[in-house]
Image (tube, helix red, strand yellow):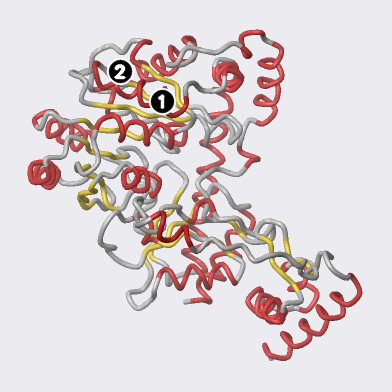
Amino acid sequence: MENDSSDRIVRHLRSLVAESGPGGRLPSTRVLARRFGAGPVTVQKAIGHLVAEGSVETRPGAGTFVTRPPTARRALEVDWQTTALGPERSGPSPIGSTLRGIDADTIAMHGGYPAIDLMPMRDVRSALTRAARSDEAFDRPPVTGVAELRAWFVRELSADGASGSGRGQPWRESDAVITSGGQSALSAVFRALAGPGESIVMESPTYWGAIAAARQAGLVIVPVARTTRAPSADDLDEAMRASGARLFYAQPNFANPTGALWTPDERRAVLDVVADRRGFLVEDDWAHDFAIDAPVAPVAADDTDGHVVYIRSLTKSASLALRVAAVIARGPARQRISNALAVSDLYVSPILQRAALDVVTRPAWRTHCTRLRRDLAERRDRLVAAIGDHAPGLEITHIPRGGLNLWLRLPEDVDAEVFAARSLAAGVSISPGAEWFPAAVAGPYIRLNYGSADPTRHVEAARILESLL
């Protein structure tokens, strides 16, 4: 029956190819599935048949198009670059699946951002317009960033400290440096505080972008295992001692990809280990605005002697257009980070800094954050219910109290990479677990972003994933 449907779709597509000519766009997978009463896998199989023939091509994020006749041109000869460039210094596959482009009809559960309808787009557009009218937006800002924006990040961290243990020392505006997003901050911190060949300890699994940044900086990654909580303080102490690492990169709150959250006792134990080893905890507070069930203070709120280097970005919670973040650190470490950023970026766009400041200092920002947490809670719960009802073969490791992701374990006999590829062909884009491990992969895992896809399609996605199992 499936072959009959596929053959009918192939014949239909061939007739459309003949009618439309080169460059013509063909109907989407969703439209074809509805028209022929077929599943997405069957439709993808039919499209793949025409791709193999060379009559159509798929363009990620755009659709399927009739191929154009090739233009005669001299073959580009770049083989010489293989020898000239030498070995890859940043390690294998440094770019994660979260940056993958997909067809508009594919259910997007692989990305690293909330859906655009969860962003304060009206406020951001208005802020950019106001910023463009200001003369200050066209003057070169200080290398460390606009003072008012630095002060806002510090006030936020100081306010978080009021709900923490109270062990920390007051932060100052001069402790903050503005960066072009969290990834830029990570790269600068790693370059500034460790040299090529030195070690950095990381939770495993952890954010693929941090893994890539550490490898590009020439650092040796020493993994310590974590599950739904923090790594063992004893394991961390031994890893830092044996490797001589001064840096420990971690996401204490709603870690990406697991959604794990450190307990208060674990936070104190980890900070004590780092302090005893005279090292630095690089705290990536990426999900600061995504605390669904209850806000949680950063570990930096308890810092006493400059052992925490704190990173917070606005890109995920405000807008992809506002690639603005801050690094907050004390002492010579802050100066080294500032110097590293000055060499790579010189300064962050003043228009973006002024617009970001405009957005976060208006009353509407608090309203947006409250609504964002409520919407994420609803999307999380709908996806959890969809998996529980329609995909019993997927094991949810735990239900996160914040963040954007569910971390799921596949049956032991399933290859996560193959499963992710089959899922994409079937119309659901997911992130395979291997890219989130800095060393040995602990099992067949996948990560699903519940904040990006249309929640009305969560059940459809769960059914497709279960069918592939």
- Which residue is rendered at x = 50% and y = 49% of the image? 380
Label 2 CA crowd tier, 10 Å (few <14, some 14–19, many 20+): some
- Which residue is rendered at x = 16% and y = 31% of the image? 279
Residue that numbered label 1 is attached to: 343
Label 2: state its secondary structure: helix
**Viewer-side label of 2, 1:** 1
Q: Quadrant of residue 13?
A: bottom right
The first of marks 2 and 1 along the sequence is 2
- Which residue is rendered at x = 46% and y = 77% of the image? 469
Q: Looking at the picture, how far across and down is residue 373, in whole percent?
A: 51, 36
**In the rendering, which numbered label is found on residue 455?**
none
- 50 vs 338, left or right, is right
Residue that numbered label 2 is attached to: 335
Q: Amino acid at mark 1?
A: Val
Q: Looking at the picture, how far across and down is residue 151, in whole percent?
A: 43, 12
Which part of the image, by quadrant, shows the N terminus?
bottom right
Label 1 CA crowd tier, 10 Å (few <14, some 14–19, many 20+): few
